[in-house]
Image: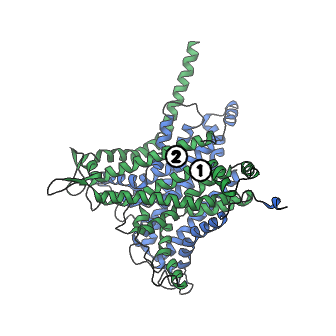
Chain colours: A green, B blue
Amino acid sequence: MASAQEAAEAAARSDVRNRWLLSAPALLIIFFAAVGPLFIMLAYSFMAKGDYGDVKFGQFSLDGWFSVLFERDIFDDTLSLADANLSVFWRSLKLSVMTTAVTLFLGFPTAYFIATRPPEKRETWLFLITIPFWTNLLIRTFAMQEVIRNEGILNSVLLALGVIDRPIQIMFTDTAILFGMVYVYLPLMVLPLYAAMDKLDFRLVEAGYDLYATRFRVLWRIIIPLVKPGIIAGSILVFVPSLGAYVIPRVLGGGKNMMLGNYIELQFGQGRNWPLGAAISITLMAVVMVALLFYVRSATRGEAGREG
Amino acid sequence: MKARHFDISAQPGFATVAMLTFVLLYLPIVTLVVYAFNAGNSIALWEGFSLRWFISAAQNERVQEASIRSLVVAAIAATIATLAATMAALATTRTRPYRGLTFKYAFINQPLMVPEIVTAVALLIVFSRIKVWTGYSGIGYLLAAHTAFCIPFAYLPIRARLEGMDLTLERAAADLYARPWMTFRRVTLPLLRPGIIAGFMLAFVISLDDVVITEFVKSAGQETLPTYMLGQLRRVVTPEINAIATAFLALSVAIVTIFFFVNRKKA
């Protein structure tokens, strides 16, 4: 009896061991070229900065983390808030929130429109959303640049219509970054919203009208509460890459309108402050991971019960 | 009578906003593609139809080199990633929960959770030091980085496919005295094939599209097509870049369309 049980346990152990061996290549590659370097970067954020970039090895320092928020005056040693850093943080946060809001405003009706088409046509509409989604991010950013530049199609049309008499400067402003991020991340809002609306039970909507609700009341009191998990999912999926955007602000914002991603690059380049760059990177990563964990939790809860 | 025509699913203005969204999504891409065929030097003034920019892009040696590098990196990275992801998926599905299973999920999906720029600078720190230590500055770093972030993309469809397969057929094969390897080759693998193809194509496109990590990891002279384009955008732009983008776009759309139909046939 005991030996049979032992044999079963041994078989289970060997099964688990085989499963570890089988997953070892994937785990090792990710460790070497993704997770491991992040830990090394964490260590770098606690070292003293080198004079020409890099860090002084083994020299512990909290300066990197300290200078995320504060700066010390080189002449009189007084402390003040690091305005340059704060303005970049603020711009990143502001633009990400605005991007989320605008994509929600455009994406909600779009997803609803697709979800209320006849079933055989939905797939085609959905395919139209997925095509831009799979198009290279850089190409889409470049396409947006061609629309909003001074000689671009937007300004040409407005000039021809006589709405304006000289081109509006959109490139290299925060507005340009906002346009670009809305354009690039819009599918990330539409797809989860559609997934939620696809399951919407329209008998509940009908019941609302039977009880003399207006269209707006049906939307506000029935549809929106039912698709709330989709709204949360879409918002997080747009907000997270917006916060970490690098290519879009680099191309459309120019050198002055930096977002977090560009600011991190600056610290590892001309800024020559690797510990600060590492500290900002770790902070960004932490914020993003919290948002994503929140997303995973709300997504699993949304599956379990409608009320969320 | 009026009640019969009352459409319960309609909401005022929604169709208009939806149409606006589709115009917004396609107007920039269409503009980009149209000016790729411009005969003039400008990406704003239309001077007639011509293929000259496609020809000049195809004859540009730097473009040729970058395109080939992009395709080679994507092919190798996607192949290794798909192999590793298939093994990992076999190891993490169709089992009772065991110690470390959740850890494996989290670990494999980790590249999806971290902003690209953060991974990029972390790799820059580590790889630049390894480059100094070993003196090796070849394509291996790019391949390693691409393989790592491709693994979760290859893993997802393979795992999804495996989870939809029960063990009945494999048990039947074992009952008929098939050895484990035989069962795998003749039963599991054919059933899993659509998932593996989907995973490979996803990984290939993701690798081909990558800008940020490549930009930070590449050594001098290792431009891929996206980093080449990023560099060109700083200079005076001619429709040549539209032509490159259009060709790239056509390739991506072709892959996605195939992916779409492969997946639909399965359902």
Q: Chain of mark 2?
A: A
Q: Position of residue B264 (x, y in %)?
A: 68, 54
Give the residue type at disc 2: Tyr
Q: Is residue A300 left or right of residue B266?
A: left
Number of residue marks: 2
Identify whether B88 is placed above or below A71: above
Separation of marks 2 and 1 at Cα, in angstroms: 10 Å
> From the image, which quarter does the N terminus of chain A lie in?
top right
Q: Residue A295 has which mark?
A: 2
> From the image, which quarter does the C terminus of chain A lie in?
top right
Q: Position of residue B265 (x, y in %)?
A: 70, 54
Give the residue type at disc 1: Gly
Q: How would you rate the neighbour count of disc 2 (Cα within 10 Å): few for under 14, some for 14-19, many for 20 or more?
A: some
Q: Quadrant of residue A188?
A: bottom right
| Outermost left residue | A75
Q: Quadrant of residue B18?
A: bottom right
Question: Looking at the image, which is closer to me, A102 or B44?
Answer: A102
Q: Residue at x 55, y 41 (%)?
A: B89
Identify whether A157 is placed above or below A112: below
Q: Is residue B93 left or right of residue B169?
A: left
Identify whether A53 is placed above or below B240: above
Identify whether B107 is placed above or below A9: below
| Outermost top residue | A1
Q: Position of residue B107 (x, y in %)?
A: 46, 42
Q: Is residue A215 left or right of residue A301?
A: right
Q: Position of residue A255 (x, y in %)?
A: 35, 68
Q: Which residue is mark 1?
A: A230
Q: Residue at x 46, y 65 (%)?
A: A178
Q: Residue at x 63, y 33 (%)?
A: B179
Q: Which structural element holds mark 1?
A: helix
